Structures are given as C-alpha cells and as structure tokens.
Image (tube, rainbow, N blue to C red):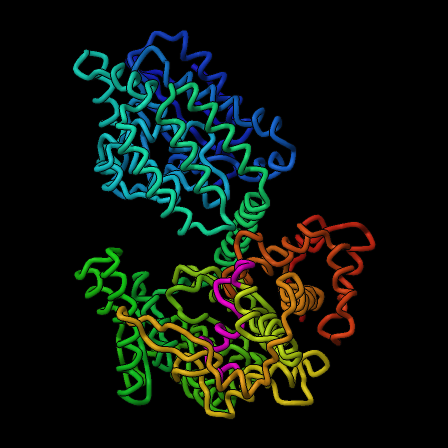
Amino acid sequence: MYQGDIFTLTRKAGIAELEINTPDSPVNVFSRKAIAELSQVLDVLEHAELSGLMIVSGKDSFLAGADIKEFTDVFSSGGEAIAAHLTPNIQNFQRLQSLPFATVAVINKLALGGGLEMALACDYRVADTGARIGLPETRLGIIPGWGGTVRLLRIAGLDTALEWIATAKEASAADALKAHVLDAVVAQDELRGCAAELLRRCAQGEMDYELRRQQKNQPLALNPIESGLAFESAKAFIAQKAGRHYPAPLAALEAIREAATKSALEAAESELAYFIQVAQTDTAKALSGLFIADQALSKKARQWQAKASVKTAKLAVVGAGIMGGGIACQSALKGLPVALKDINQKGIDLGLQEAASVLGRRVEKGKMSVAALAEALTRIQPTLNDQPLATADVVVEAVVENIAVKKTVLADVEAQLPATAVLSSNTSTISITELATALTRPEQFCGLHFFNPVHAMPLVEVIRGAKTSDDTVARAVECAGALGKKAVVVNDCAGFLVNRVLFAYFAGFAALLDDGVDFTHIDAAMVRWGWPMGPAHLLDVVGLDTAEHAEATMANAFPERMGRTNPSPTTILYQAGLLGQKGGKGFYCYEKDKRGRPQKTPNPDAVQMLNIQSTAKPDDETIVLRMMAPLVNELCRTLQEGIVGSVAEADMAMIYGLGFPAHRGGVLRWVDSIGVRQFCEQLNTLRQYGPLYQTEPMMSELAEQGASFYGSAATSATLNPSH
C-alpha cells in the first residue's frame, strides 16, 4: 500500500500493518523525513477500505521519539520556526486519531517521547512485559510537543499526567497497565496476535473505539476546587524538585492545567505555545546539546566494545573496603559474577557491608525486591586466597593509594591471572605507565577509575598507559559497559582527566580563601550557580586526608599552576587533625539528623585557622569566574595534550564525574554560550592572580577566529594513542 525509506504499509485480510524502520539507526526516531512519510501514509489510509490498523516496529524497540539533532537547530531559529517544525506531526497524530477504523500501537521494549505520543493517538496500546514507556522531554528542558500533555491527561487522568510528564518518568509495562495507558501487556511473541484480536473485536462492534476518541477530544470533567488544590500542591512540589534552573517541569504543569479545561484542539495550541516558550531557553539548548554529546560518547564506547577480543564474564576486585565493595556491588547488581579479595577478613566484611548497604537502600526505595537483593549478593564471592583470580576476565585493583603498595599487589595478582586476563587499577592519581613497570604484561594493564560512591556516579575513566594495547582498552570499555557505566578513554597523566581538572578548580578555591573570602560564601555562590555542593563541602565529602594527598600529587606534577609556597587550606585543616565529613569535622561540623543523614554547620575552628575575613565579600559573578576559570583552562590543556579525545568527551566527563551543572550543557558548552572571545576578555581581568588564570592557546585561537568549541575541529578530534 505504501513503501518509503522509513515507513512500510502492508495489508492482510482487511487489516493494515504500518512498520517503522529508521535506516542507519539503532532506534526509530521521528526525523523530518519520517514526519513527511507519515503524512503520505495517512493520505493512503484515509481513503482505504480497512477494518483496522496496527503500528509496529522493524527494530527491537518501538520508537525513541524526535530526532534531537534536528530539534537543536530549530531551537535557535525562533518561535515561528519551532511551530513550523512541530505542526506537521501535530496534524499527523490528529489525522491518525481520526482514521475511519480502529488503531493499535504495538509497543516492543521502548516508547518514549514522540514514540509514546504516536501511541497515545492510537485507540489502543499493547506492550511486551519488559517495555518501558514515558514522556521524558522535561529531561531535555522542553515539554511534549505532539499532543502528549493533551492525550495522556485524558487517557490516564490528572495525577498520572502530572507525575509522568513533570518528572520525566519512564514507567514499566505493569505500571502503565495500572495507569490505563496500556490496554494489554503480553509476551513479545504474542504482541501482534493480541493487536489483531483487539482490531477484530472493534470491527465486530464488541469494543467501542469511538467512545475513546470522544474522551480524548473533550475537556476533563474536573471539580474546580479539587483540581485547583491539586494543581497548586503539584506546583509547589514540582518547583522544589526541579529547582530554579529548570523551567520545563512547571511549563508542563501549566500546559496540563490549560489542557484540562479546553477541547483537544485548543489544548494542542496551548501545548505548542508552552513548548515554544521553553524551547528557546538556555536550559533547553544546553540539555539538548548534552543529549547529543552523550550519544556521541555512547557511540564511541560501542566502537571500542565491538573491538574487544573477550567479553567480561567474571570480574575480580582486589582490595575490599568501601571502593572495592562498591565495585563488587555494581557488578553483582548488573548480573556479573565477581570475586572480592582481601588479605584480611575485616576488609572483606567492610566490602560486603558496603554492598549490602547499597542494595538495601534499593529495596527501601522499592527499586529492588528482597529476593533480588539476596540473589545479587550470591554473585559476590568473598575470598582471602588467590584461587578465584585464576578464572577472572578482568581484575580491578582497589587497594590503598600508595605507589609502592600498589606495585607489589599488582605484580602478585598478575602472577595468579590467566594469560588472557586484563589487569587494571582503580587509582585516582598514580601514573598507569609507572605502575606498569612492575608488570610482565604491561600491554594488558590499564586504569579503570571508578568514582565514589560507585553505584551513584555514572563515569569510569579508562586510562591508557604508554604500553597499554588497543585490545586492553577495548576490553576495559566493554567491562565498564557491562557494569552499566559511561566510559571515557583518556591518556595517562597525573590525575588523569577528572581529578586533574578538579584540583585546578580546588586551586581556584584556595586562592579565594587566601584572599580571606569565607568558604561558606563561596559554597553558597557555587550552589546557586548550579553545582550540587560547594568546593568546601565537596572537599569534606572527598576527605581532607585523600584531598591533601591528591593535592600534593598534582602540585608535584604541575608546580607552575598548582604548586604553592605556603600550605594550602586543605593542608592546614588536615594537619590540625580534621578529616572532613568522615571524621565529623572539616570545613564544616557534621551531625546526623533523625534519618541518619549528615547535617553541616560551619566549623568555627576552620574559620579561625584559615583567617577568614568577614570584609572580603566578592559578588557571585566574581566568585564563579575565579572558581571556573582554572577549571576551564585545565580542561583546555587536556584537549591540547591529547589526554581526552574530544570536546564532547571532555564535557561529559565533567558532567558524569564531577556533577557539573547539567543545565549549563557542559563546561565548554557553557563557555560557548558566553562566547569564547567574551570569556577570554573576562579572563584577562584576572591575570594578576597568576598562572591558573592565563588564557590557554586553544581558547585564544578560537577567540581570534570568532569560533566556538562545538563549532571547531576539536569537537571531532580523536584520541592519539601515542601520548
């Protein structure tokens, strides 16, 4: 009946089957071409003699939504361009909803964003038992734009619409069935049969699909007082949850509020108006850019994984404790058997305790059953001897951060491993090339740097030493993927990528403290700017002993920028016996509340020791620039030196490894948003503060050219293995 590049329409026994299959893409997406083809398909369907239509996917998932790469260009083109981009598919879905026969969306695996909006325009929706569906647009700084706020509200009710859309929730098939968003949940091989049966019953008059359409076209019958209270309480909750940097969730609420009292056509106009409003915000541009950068990161990881000679079937972690236990827990959670080795039972107990604690919190939050917790723990094999190492594919060393100890342990472990195994270190600062000098197979050794807490931090740095082979890198990336982590491949240097850049940021913090600025004032300014916590609080969480050790490593490696002639604030507090949060005192004093969560108050001893001056109160803009300039400069240096392979990878490492504010789209995208030339001009006003604040050649060159990081060749640079 129709054959396009993306859509294929076939007919069998009076029922049409519309298959979506986006070429050269792992998932189906709504591109401009797909929207145009769907319009042509509807031209055929509107004049066809049929008893029903089922929409199916030619891939292993239904539809992932809009082509975000196309959206980002449109966002910068103004309201009229955004409306022109959205309107054709708004009309497509209205036409789909009005076809002269029943329609069923057959959902396998995923229906997200525009994919779910298309399914909501159908009369019925059936999904497989493992499917996940949702409208996650607010995660991108926008709202549903093809009728999501209009139809979900009428199909599932006010509470479900507000929860799913404002919080970008992805619901399981079981939850979606309870919410009446799905009409049936069956095994994957029964999907088409179930859809055909629904269409047969509609054609024979056993099911009234026209009644459903009436419901989708009419305003909701809501009690004005009750709905007013519901919206106001939801507004307060969403505003608190989203925070001031994320306008989309509240815009979604307002779109739903208006949709409730209007006809479907009028509600669609309101939705479009709110979409145009949020799509033009800096947050939407940043988050959509972040989404594209994340896709680039995932693509590069898949390319590495495809080269791996061996897939990880068993992991081993040497050195239990908090980090070792966290890595073992993550492995067990992802279904990967793991041996957890230590030299004493106390270490083993601590590692198992960490794993049980992390999994226990998942049970408390309803993310895991007690049975699943027990099953996960059985995948961890605690051991005091070397025997389990003989069957490991990948081993992660996670002992104390001491080069002599690590070299001894790594050499001992290597002797126990099969010849094919990859050996790695979870070191956060020690050179991988230097550690490899203790090994007989340095080509099979790399860094595999996890971040604490392991279960919460998405990033893993895969560090290539001077002799690390490509296959070792590929297998390390594959292992990180098996553990559900985002891998960034970097070359070896002090601090690698994330910690090197982080300690430049801390050096900026120390310089402000040297000037007598109150650390609580700095923390508050950086949190207002969007960081999850300020630098003083972060140092306390890292641990002042750990931070002092890493700071010394970085100062030795980069003395011209990070070296000091006088003790740093971190050193002063550490030498006074303060350890930070784990010791109860650091920059702040910590006491646990009724829920056992640490609550902080400024430590008066720290204020006195650091000679904080109450008169030194720079404004937020000055603090942000003095904190961020060293970080930006150091990140540029890692690109110039080939430590990290591309702008996108550098930015995603800052997001996933440091918690850089997502609404700013990444460090270098934030600089782009200011303008590289303008940022360099701001930097010039800080030159008196020393080497940390001297503009890097990469930035100077871009500024001279009037170029940007994401418009330059740096965005597509590849990692040079020779570094």
Position of residue 50 relative to residue 643, above or below, is: above
Choose between 407 and 157: the one closer to the eye: 157
| Residue at (46, 46) in percent of width and height | 139
Residue at the location (58% across, 35% down)?
70
* Residue 34 placement (x, y as % from top left): 51, 27
Quick check: is 332 in the magenta stretch? no
Viewer-nearest residue: 470 or 290: 290
* View extreme (front): residue: 615
- Which residue is outermost to the right? 704
Q: Which corner quadrant holds the N terminus?
A: top left
Which span of residues is magenta-colored? 527-547
Residue 85 in the image: above or below residue 2? below
Nearer to us in this view, 676 or 711: 676
x, y (%) of residue 311? 40, 62
Q: Does any portion of residue 51 appear in the rendered image? A: yes
Q: Position of residue 334 (x, y in %)?
A: 32, 61
- Nearest the viewer among 308 and 177 is 177
Q: Which residue is rendered at x = 43% and y = 32% of the image? A: 255
Quadrant of the rendering where the C terminus is positioned: bottom right
Give above or below for 371 relative to 592.
above
How many circles with numbers are drawn on the protein? 0
Q: Residue 282: x percent and y percent? A: 59, 45
482 is higher (above) or lower (below) than 149 = below
Q: Residue 647 falls in which quadrant of the image? A: bottom right
Q: Is residue 528 magenta?
A: yes
At 47% across and 26% down in the image, what residue appears? 270
Q: Is residue 270 left or right of residue 75?
A: left
Q: Is residue 462 visible?
A: no
Main secondary-structure element of the magenta-colored stretch: helix
